């Protein structure tokens, strides 16, 4: 699975007055990604292959086409990315990292393949993956490193919680400490940054809100302040930016609106305008979405654009879970119906 | 080498001022055979730059010729070499330019110099701080705000005025699309317009007017003339780096560009002859083609298809003249060169504006005075000295006004202990257009060059081929402000 | 990410055969290089030659994180421990005088620099040469590597892996080099990150890196002292610099430095009050100046200052000893200023929003219900908000509800 950008371009031809979601071209676009091995960019983006598979697969699930990629090959590829230490790399032979480990678990969850880990994964099965993740927790501060080299970032707490919770191994880590750490990253504007002291950033806010959602600790969020800051991310044209005074970008359609959703403030922005912005980022003929109208499409923006639309309950898309960025159906199947009944 | 007369020239250009030099460059790059002559023994014409010795020679010529153009009434004063303080250095330590001009970052001249590759031989320096003189305040030199951030910090402007000023600035950078605001007032004076439409105080009116570099007082600057100039100033800031909006070429400003253009013109096949002018010319027909037969002042006869002469035939009634002083001061005047913004280069040129009637009592000052202060970084004087270029519209007492402005400047920078070492006064009459006197390079000149180039190229080819100076973008000149890419 | 802000290119025909062949050649070259490195690493060839190969690959693709990891292993398990002459041609800096003055470290450390307990299976657990940390070689290598990184960072200023690797390299310097030499390296980083922030004053990698560099320079292990004063001064300069008023990153950093700044100044209550007044003056002037077009950054910083008065959690940060009356007085004064600001800026939604927020906050602080005037004012302001900012009508609905309660 690749995330080579192009060949499509968003809004290539004038869309009809009534903007439509072009499902079939998106499906074909995602299916075509792995056939582009004759392009240099395919190889230059190998370090994102597993993420790319998750983005593409999730997009297909949201489009109600979960079988558009072959299940067995998908599982084979995921398992081929596992390193001896239990974690997953971006592609076979690449070093393990939390970013890809979380994607691997999400993909397996989506294709109902977590059981395959026990059978065909590295020794220890799911537990080996859980241990890999748990070992990355800094037991003093509660935060997580991305890999053995120690870089810490609130994104990694989210990755760890997503991975561990889907494997039902959250008990391996110190949740309270991690939550305290997230709280220490909160800023006066209600947002969160990469580390204590860092500026609020929508991507990081998503990571922190998702981690707090999974840990059932959203009570720690100053929802009105954060909601205000997040709602101000919507710009004139309907799109969302990541920080004050920046350009809008389709990926923030997800980071911002999912965060608003998690804190119960999604209605604080204009969903109709946002939908139109996202739809304008489609390539209506060749499929795929770009960061902004007129730019090259890629699978990253395709996923997060569609996920944004799904969050806005756009017609024809599967319901999406705001914290996991996966179909609610999948989350419910893996975690049980009680997950959504929790209050 | 072939003699000049063996060649049939496409164009004979007389005079190596900036405009002619750029034309010669453009034509020679388009494959024309160019003979470029100048009756002076130096390049640059009215934009020439001189050592002290060369100034003396020039002065002698001007003073000996009552009808000399465009310069007149030149006189020189030098400080007595006395009391052991450092005085003037040797002649070649100075490069004094007769028509100093700043070049705004957004001027087409710069993109043309880039696309024609001529810029590689030039070194540009920042024109940084702008100062406005206000004889009534204690600190009589006030730094002009250099954009939004400076305005915010300026404690002399109250908050409401800041907002009014920002409203005006927002308007002016987009004035072309906001015609309803200004067109009814297009010919009114700027000061009144600023007061009525934007509630700007007299002091802010002076600030805004200063940015036009107009020789007229602010109530006489037509709005339609002022707005593009103010917009040019504002939109130029930050284009090449933080904190400045204009540049000057090192080693003598426009003279340097002329020379570099001539050198490039020569590389492109042009032939240059200095100390030689056109004596007579007559039209002859040869092989069915009309040619000019020209006798040069060195006695040679040449044939050319076309002559671009020195500018002639303008309406004498509307001619403007300015008075100028080039002064050398015994101090680097460091207080005028401040870098207030993170990452901005230290400026080599500061601009001082004395609005009309701002000089102390006793000096009738009908018009604004501008002083461009060039630090030694410009290569125009030794370190620890400065070159000051003062200009005002010529009037009965313009010499006294310039002298008063210079002494007011030295007084308000007293901590720097600068003393006047050298002062060259002269008057300069406009040539083809007002643009020749402008203190900032006026793109009209470039337009004139392009028009001349087009005419010549179209006449000869029937159609226009190639493009003038080959416009193309230089890497890094475009703003890179597209930063949505902070992916997760 | 794959293609942020890549503009649509002109409609082009299919690649020509020549282009296809050229791309094929490039792919082959790239993959051959990848395989070559992989093969050499499998043989544990931790040599300069392989280091150069990784340089070649990383210049083509700095996002290739595994290769950065290979580079780390090459250094710590191989090259840092080789005799110094082997590194001479790698040193990019012609100035090697520092090398001569350094002494061999007495520490014979084989401890892992890995900060978490996880360990890569591809990393040999016992370094072949345990005498790593000889200052000369290590310093040359680190300096060479820092210089190798710089142009790539300028080209790819938003690549996470580059910033991480650079930081790791400098932390290696802390482990292996004399502290004064390590400190010198960190000092240069402060200059470097200053330059990066001049190029892009909002790069959050840059700001994060600056935070880390400063905290290293402040740390006792490098003989550091607090830099809170100079850092605060830096934010002032950034705010006053190009596009500074809209530089939320700089305002944010300022908000974080202030509490420490005042503590370290041992500021008296009077000084703190004055400080707060000055900050208000600064930001109000910015709000006036930055109001066309209406920008957000100044308003968020204003929110920060107000938070220190209105929010229980924020009280400690600037004026901890303010009485409830002091705080109410300040908020009241700000409400007057905001109302005044409205005159001539009736289309500025931020003012209405702030007026409502702080009127309500004042009531909460005074533990009372809003009086009739306040209720009417809030209703008027809310109506303006709805008019000026219909996109956020859901928020105004909720605000209306909360005003009613």
Image (cartoon, coloured by chain):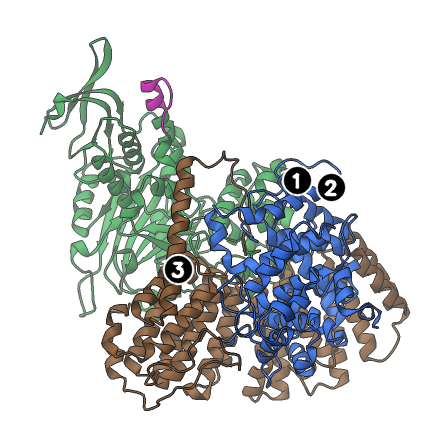
- For chain A, give the colour: blue
Where is mark 2, residue-wise? Answer: A20
Residue A157's spot in the image, x, y percent?
63, 73
Residue B413 shows in this picture = no
Crowd band around label 1 with a 10 angstrom C-alpha radius: few (<14), some (14–19), many (20+): many
Residue at coordinates 34% horizontally, 76% vertically from top-left? C78
**Quick one: B358 or B124, which is closer to the camera?**
B124
Secondary structure at badge 3 equals helix
Residue A330 picture quarter: bottom right
Residue A324 picture quarter: bottom right
Q: Is B387 above or below relative to B232?
A: below
Crowd band around label 2 with a 10 angstrom C-alpha radius: few (<14), some (14–19), many (20+): some
Secondary structure at badge 1 equals loop
Give yes or no for contact between labels 1 and 2 (Cβ–Cβ under 8 Å).
yes
Q: Quadrant of the C terminus of chain A?
A: bottom right
Where is mark 3, residue-wise? Answer: C35
Which chain is painted in brown?
C
Letter of the chain that mark 2 sits on in the rendering: A
Magenta segment: B455-466
**Quick one: B394 or C116, which is closer to the camera?**
C116
Which chain is painted in green?
B
Where is mark 1, residue-wise? Answer: A284
Q: Is B49 above or below relative to C39?
A: above
């Amino acid at each position: 699975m690749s995330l080579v950008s192009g060949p499509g371009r968003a809004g290539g031809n004038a869309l009809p007055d009534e903007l439509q979601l072009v499902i079939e071209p998106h499906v074909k676009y995602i299916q075509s990604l792995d056939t582009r091995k004759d392009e240099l960019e395919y190889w230059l983006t190998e370090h994102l292959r597993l993420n790319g598979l998750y983005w593409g697969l999730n997009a297909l699930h949201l489009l109600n086409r979960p079988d558009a990629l072959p299940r067995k090959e998908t599982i084979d590829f995921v398992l081929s990315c596992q390193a001896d230490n239990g974690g997953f790399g971006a592609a076979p032979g690449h070093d393990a990292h939390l970013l890809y480990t979380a994607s691997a678990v999400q993909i397996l969850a989506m294709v109902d393949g977590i059981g395959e880990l026990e059978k065909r994964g590295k020794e220890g099965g799911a537990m080996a993956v859980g241990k890999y993740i748990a070992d990355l927790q800094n037991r003093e501060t509660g935060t997580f490193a991305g890999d053995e080299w120690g870089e810490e970032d609130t994104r990694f707490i989210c990755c760890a919680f997503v991975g561990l919770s889907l494997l039902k191994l959250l008990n391996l880590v110190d949740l309270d400490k991690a939550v305290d750490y997230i709280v220490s990253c909160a800023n006066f504007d209600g947002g969160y940054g990469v580390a204590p002291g860092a500026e609020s950033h929508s991507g990081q806010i998503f990571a922190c809100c998702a981690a707090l959602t999974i840990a059932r600790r959203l009570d720690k969020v100053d929802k009105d302040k954060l909601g205000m800051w997040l709602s101000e991310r919507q710009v004139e044209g309907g799109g969302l930016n990541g920080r004050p005074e920046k350009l809008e970008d389709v990926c923030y359609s997800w980071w911002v609106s999912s965060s608003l959703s998690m804190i119960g403030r999604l209605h604080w922005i204009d969903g109709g305008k946002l939908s139109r912005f996202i739809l304008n980022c489609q390539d209506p003929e060749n499929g795929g979405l770009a960061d902004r109208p007129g730019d090259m499409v890629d699978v990253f923006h395709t996923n997060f654009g569609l996920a944004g639309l799904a969050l806005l309950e756009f017609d024809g898309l599967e319901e999406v879970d705001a914290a996991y960025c996966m179909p609610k159906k999948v989350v419910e199947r893996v975690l049980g119906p009680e997950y959504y009944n929790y209050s | 080498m072939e003699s000049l007369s063996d060649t049939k020239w496409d164009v004979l250009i007389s005079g190596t001022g900036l405009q002619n030099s750029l034309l010669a460059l453009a034509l020679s790059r388009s494959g024309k055979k160019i003979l470029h002559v100048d009756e002076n023994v130096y390049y640059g014409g009215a934009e020439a730059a001189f050592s002290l010795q060369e100034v003396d020679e020039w002065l002698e010529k001007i003073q000996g010729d009552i009808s000399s153009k465009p310069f007149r009434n030149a006189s020189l004063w030098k400080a007595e070499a006395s009391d052991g303080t450092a005085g003037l250095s040797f002649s070649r330590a100075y490069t004094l330019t007769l028509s100093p001009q700043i070049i705004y970052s957004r001027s087409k001249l710069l993109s043309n110099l880039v696309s024609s590759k001529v810029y590689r031989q030039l070194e540009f320096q920042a024109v940084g701080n702008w100062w406005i003189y206000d004889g009534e305040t204690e600190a009589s030199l006030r730094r002009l705000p250099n954009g939004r951030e400076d305005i915010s910090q300026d404690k002399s402007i109250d908050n409401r005025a800041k907002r009014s000023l920002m409203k005006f600035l927002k308007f002016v950078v987009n004035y072309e699309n906001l015609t309803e605001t200004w067109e009814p007032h297009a010919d009114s004076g700027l000061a009144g317009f600023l007061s009525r439409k934007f509630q700007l105080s007299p002091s802010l009116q002076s600030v805004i007017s200063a940015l036009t570099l107009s020789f007229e007082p602010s109530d006489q600057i037509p709005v339609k003339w002022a707005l593009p100039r103010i917009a040019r100033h504002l939109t130029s800031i930050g284009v090449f780096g933080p904190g400045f909006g204009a540049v000057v070429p090192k080693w003598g400003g426009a003279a340097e560009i002329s020379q570099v253009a001539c050198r490039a013109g020569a590389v492109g096949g042009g032939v240059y002859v200095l100390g030689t002018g056109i004596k007579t010319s007559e039209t002859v027909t040869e092989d069915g083609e009309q040619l000019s037969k020209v006798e040069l002042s060195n006695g040679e006869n040449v044939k050319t298809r076309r002559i671009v002469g020195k500018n002639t035939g303008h309406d004498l009634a509307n001619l403007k003249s300015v008075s100028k002083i080039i002064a050398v001061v015994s101090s680097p005047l460091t207080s005028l060169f401040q870098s207030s913004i993170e990452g901005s280069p230290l400026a080599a040129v500061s601009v001082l504006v004395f609005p009309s009637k701002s000089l102390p009592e006793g000096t009738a000052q009908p018009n604004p005075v501008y002083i461009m202060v060039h630090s030694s970084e410009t290569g125009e004087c030794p370190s620890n000295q400065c070159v000051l270029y003062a200009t005002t519209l010529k009037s009965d007492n313009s010499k006294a006004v310039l002298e008063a402005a210079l002494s007011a400047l030295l007084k308000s920078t007293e901590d720097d202990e600068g003393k006047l070492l050298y002062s060259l006064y002269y008057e300069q009459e406009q040539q083809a257009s007002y643009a020749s006197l402008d203190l900032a390079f006026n793109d009209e000149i470039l337009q004139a060059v392009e028009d001349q180039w087009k005419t010549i190229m179209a006449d000869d080819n029937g159609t226009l081929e190639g493009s003038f100076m080959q416009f193309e973008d230089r890497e890094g000149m475009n703003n890179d402000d597209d930063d949505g890419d902070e992916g997760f | 990410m794959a293609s942020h802000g890549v503009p649509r290119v002109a409609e082009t025909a299919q690649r020509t055969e020549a282009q296809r062949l050229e791309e094929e050649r490039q792919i082959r070259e790239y993959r051959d290089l990848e395989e070559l490195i992989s093969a050499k690493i499998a043989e544990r060839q931790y040599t300069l030659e392989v280091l150069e190969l990784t340089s070649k690959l990383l210049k083509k693709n700095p996002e290739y994180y595994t290769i950065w990891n290979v580079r780390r292993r090459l250094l710590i398990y191989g090259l840092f421990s080789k005799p110094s002459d082997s590194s001479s041609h790698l040193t990019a800096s012609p100035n090697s005088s520092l090398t001569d003055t350094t002494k061999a470290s007495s520490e014979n450390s084989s401890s892992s620099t890995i900060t978490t307990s996880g360990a890569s299976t591809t990393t040999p657990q016992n370094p072949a040469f345990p005498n790593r940390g000889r200052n000369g070689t290590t310093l040359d290598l680190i300096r060479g590597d820092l210089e190798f990184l710089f142009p790539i960072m300028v080209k790819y200023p938003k690549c996470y892996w580059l910033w991480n690797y650079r930081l790791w390299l400098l932390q290696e310097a802390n482990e292996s080099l004399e502290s004064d030499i390590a400190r010198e390296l960190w000092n240069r980083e402060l200059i470097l990150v200053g330059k990066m922030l001049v190029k892009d004053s909002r790069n959050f990698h840059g700001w994060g890196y600056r935070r880390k560099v400063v905290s290293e320079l402040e740390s006792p292990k490098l003989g550091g002292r607090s830099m809170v004063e100079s850092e605060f001064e830096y934010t002032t300069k950034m705010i006053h610099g190009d596009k500074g008023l809209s530089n939320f990153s700089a305002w944010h950093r300022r908000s974080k430095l202030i509490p420490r700044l005042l503590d370290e100044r041992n500021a008296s209550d009077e000084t703190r009050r004055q400080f707060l007044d000055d900050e208000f003056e600064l930001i109000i002037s910015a709000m006036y100046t930055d109001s066309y077009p209406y920008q957000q950054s100044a308003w968020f910083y204003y929110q920060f200052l107000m938070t220190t008065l209105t929010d229980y959690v924020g009280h400690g940060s600037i004026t901890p000893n303010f009485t409830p009356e002091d705080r109410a007085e300040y908020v009241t004064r700000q409400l007057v200023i905001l109302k005044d600001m409205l005159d001539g800026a009736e289309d500025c939604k931020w003012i209405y929003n702030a007026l409502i927020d702080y009127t309500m906050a004042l009531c909460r602080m005074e533990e009372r219900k809003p009086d009739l005037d306040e209720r009417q004012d809030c209703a008027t302001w809310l109506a303006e908000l709805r008019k000026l900012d219909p996109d956020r009508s859901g928020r105004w609905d909720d605000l209306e509800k909360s005003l009613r309660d």
